[in-house]
Amino acid sequence: MVDLRVSGGLQPYAPLAFGARAVPRLVLELRAPEPLTRSRALETLCALVHDPERAYEAVRTGFLELLKVLLREEGPTLRSKTAELVFLLAAHSISREALLRCNIVPVLSELLDDPEEGCRRNTHLALHRLALLPAAAACMASLNLVPRLLGKVAEEEEAVDPLLLCTISVCVRQDALPAVAHDGVSVLGRQLTQPCPEVRRAAATALMGVSVPAQGKLKLCEGPVLSVLVGLLSDSDPDVQAAAAGAIMNTAVITKGKLLALRSGALDPLLLLVSSPHRAVCLNALRALTALADAPSARRRLLEELPVLQSRTGAEEEEVVWRAAQTAVRVVTWTP
């Protein structure tokens, strides 16, 4: 799980007007000429908007346009705290939709190159949470953020922030082609061997999104990336296993991906994952095996392992697992 704690230490809270006047007064103080007053007001608002009612109240004051101004402040603390406030507001559906309507994503994206590390991290947190709305993720893709983000991954190399990869992941789910066109498979593939499980997980998840279009499937068949994904089927992190199996599942739809996955030894680790207690791991393994079963050599082997597939067709299984297992058995046992 990516660490979702915001950056920046606590500042002394602004003097707080209690009751119904609390939020309006703080919003008023955001317009104060003194940076310290604005900073303290932001800090206090960050504490208050954890409460959905306070968050909705803040949105009703109409101060979201003001946040766009504060995101462009000269002081790094003000920029960072404003990005944090956007992140906290985006936890609630109504305020998340309001932020999108006020077109805050383009302004936030300007902070991806901010010199302050804490500001960049809070920006990634805000973008990642906003992307829960498909329209926001589509907006990020339309702003051509993916090439910029991939460039940052390539720059950081050994110290990649998982949040950076998570932001890429939500963008490629909307449109994977920019990542394919800008060497995304190679850039993300290099992160699959990082010691940090959060980095491996985010990179594998992004590659699962990249492998959806035909161009992405073909790119995954170039170089060592697909073989590395096969190796990750034995990773100690179930989420990494699930994402790796998902990327293999997508790539094995085409003949080239199917044959390469088989040559890389995908069958044995996928069969082991069928018995996983983690639903996503089991599902993606079953679906990957179903795609691979179109190859005669794979079908012959899977016929020998049919009891493994049938073990997930019991009445006690979740319906989605049961259906995937039934489909796998049907494809493996099909005869012309």
Image: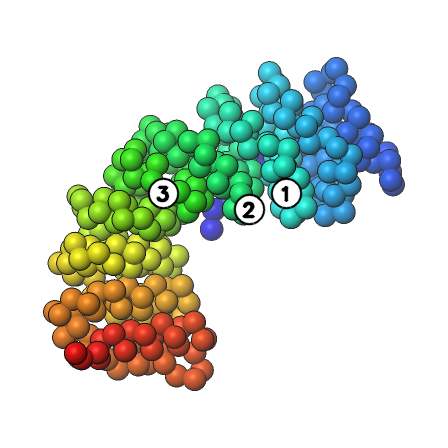
- Residue 204 in view, yes or no: no
Disc 3 element: loop
Q: Is residue 148 above or below residue 277?
A: above
Tell me if mark 1 has few (under 14), some (14-19) or many (20+) residues whose alpha carbon lies within 10 angstroms of its own: some
Tell me if mark 3 has few (under 14), some (14-19) or many (20+) residues whose alpha carbon lies within 10 angstroms of its own: many
User: Are the residues flagged by discs 1 and 2 in contact, CB closer than 8 Å?
Assistant: yes
The residue identified by callout 1 is 97
What quarter of the picture does the C terminus occupy? bottom left
Disc 2 element: loop
Q: Residue furthest front?
A: 336
Q: Where residue 11 appears, x then y in whole percent? A: 69, 29
> Residues under labels 3 and 2: Cα distance?
17 Å
Which residue type carries mark 3? Ala
Q: Along the polypeptide, which appears first: circle 1 or circle 2?
A: 1
Disc 1 element: helix
The residue identified by callout 3 is 176
Which residue is pictured at 16% across the width and 66% down the height?
A: 295
Which residue type carries mark 2? Leu
Which residue is pictured at 40% across the width and 73% down the height?
A: 321
Q: Where residue 280 appears, x then y in whole percent? A: 40, 63
> Quarter-wise, where is residue 105 in the image?
top right
